[in-house]
Image (tube, rainbow, N blue to C red):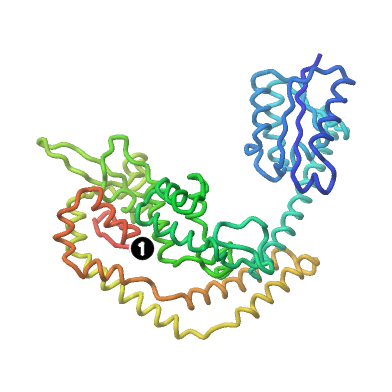
Amino acid sequence: MQRAALYIRVSTEEQAQHGYSLEAQKHALTEYAKEHDMYIVDYYVDDGYSARRKYTSRKDFMRMLADVQSDRIDIILFIKLDRWFRSVKDYYKIQEILEAHNVGWKTTEENYDTTTTNGRLYINIRLSVAQDESDRTSDRIKFVFDNKVSRGEVISGAQPMGFRIENKHLVSDEETKDIVRDMFEYFTLHQSKYAVIRYIYEKYGIATDKSTMKKMLVNRLYIGEYRDNLSYCKPLIDRDLFEKAQRIIAEKGIRRPPSGRVYIFSGLIRCADCGHIFCGNHTLRSEREYVYYRCNFEANLKTCKNTSRFNEKDIEKWLLENIEDEVKAYVAEQTSKQSKKMNKPTIDRAKIKRKIGKLKELYLNELITLDEYRMDYESLNAQLVEDNETSAPPTYTKGLLDFIGGDFRETYGTLDRKKRKAVWRGIIREISVDRSKNMTIIFL
């Protein structure tokens, strides 16, 4: 008896449109296996997985592939070729694995022959047609959704805490909007997702987990942005508060060395020659520890010409001596830029959005090509983005001025390494260094 794997896949959309329900496929495949005297090894079911997604994301498909490689399967059954793949490239990648383990496949509702040249050509044609149909459908759905987003309309019924849907648009939920603000403020103060989870549960009785909390903390809907629409809805929290939370999350995401040693400028120093981050190192000389930084690519791959080593104490000394002048120059530059922006003429955003809507209608009615649509869309959208930058509030620089306003050098000398690291990460995005040891500060 042939050992048969029964593969079943359906996406929610296909199940609704074509009746490819899981039970219908399972029944048809089981009957076929029984009629042809096959032993059913297992049912491999991918529910809600589109054929457009990478096959590695299909959990049961990968489980079945592991059984193929363990030589537990002789043949794979599925009802139609589009249940298997809609990508010619992925099809042949998996076909190589099947042939290496002498595993065949069979569609119960279609007839294919992989033993002849004409048969393989026919499969190529069918896969290409299926892939093209899938791409066209995806493009149409994407443009419909883009059109809704450009008008500020919702495309899903599920919305994050703090919002509710009213007339197809997101508006603030009076019952939960203050909880969201409280959540962000508490996180930026305590810098711990677990602390926020406990706080929200104890104060408001709302239970959540770490994954959900992280999704909320990085959700740009809270500052009114969604996809390419930078004014999708009214923001719930201040942009400065949101960006501060993002910096904390990025800092928490940096892997700590196994030794637990704190490198003050870890993740901050970038090579001006190759663009890669410097790595922290330490060495002992005469029973004294020296901490230095060097280009990761030069250190490991020898592909960068920046061989300079930067002593941590030298970097601290340079920053403390120059930070005041650097901050003042940066503030002056931002003030000048903002002044120029405010003098730019405003544009009719509503008119441009109407043009984008009409443009999508032309494409959906096949009156213009995809390339023509993309070119015109990018031009119109660029005007909206530029206008949004023009109307944005002035760059926040008060915190930098406050930083240099006090006796920060004396205070800095009393801090431990972890707090010194937090100080620089709170105001600096990166420090660019070249092989001549010139340093350039890029502020947040």
- Residue 395 shown left or right of residue 360 in the figure: left
- Residue 295 shown left or right of residue 340 in the figure: left
Quarter-of-image position of residue 73: top right
Q: Give the farthest residue toward the top.
A: 1
Quarter-of-image position of residue 52: top right
Q: Quadrant of the N terminus?
A: top right
Expressed as whole percent of the image width and height from the top left, the position of residue 258 reads: 32, 35
Vertical relation: 242 (above or below) 314: below
Expressed as whole percent of the image width and height from the top left, the position of residue 432 reads: 31, 58
Expressed as whole percent of the image width and height from the top left, the position of residue 426 reads: 31, 59
Q: Amino acid at mark 1?
A: Leu
- Residue at 44% x, 83% y is 342
Vertical relation: 366 (above or below) 351: above
Q: Quadrant of the C terminus?
A: bottom left
- Residue at 75% x, 30% y is 7
Residue that carries the numbered disc 1 in the rendered image:
444
How many numbered discs? 1
- Residue at 83% x, 36% y is 80
Q: Give the farthest residue toward the right.
A: 35
Expressed as whole percent of the image width and height from the top left, the position of residue 411 reads: 16, 59
- Give the SS element for disc 1: loop
- Residue at 83% x, 18% y is 38
Quarter-of-image position of residue 87: top right
- Residue 187 shown left or right of residue 415 in the figure: right
Q: Residues within 10 Å of mark 1 (few under 14, many from 20)?
A: some
Vertical relation: 354 (above or below) 418: below
Vertical relation: 267 (above or below) 149: above
Q: Which residue is at the front of the view, 238 or 122? A: 238
- Residue 406 shown left or right of residue 385 in the figure: left
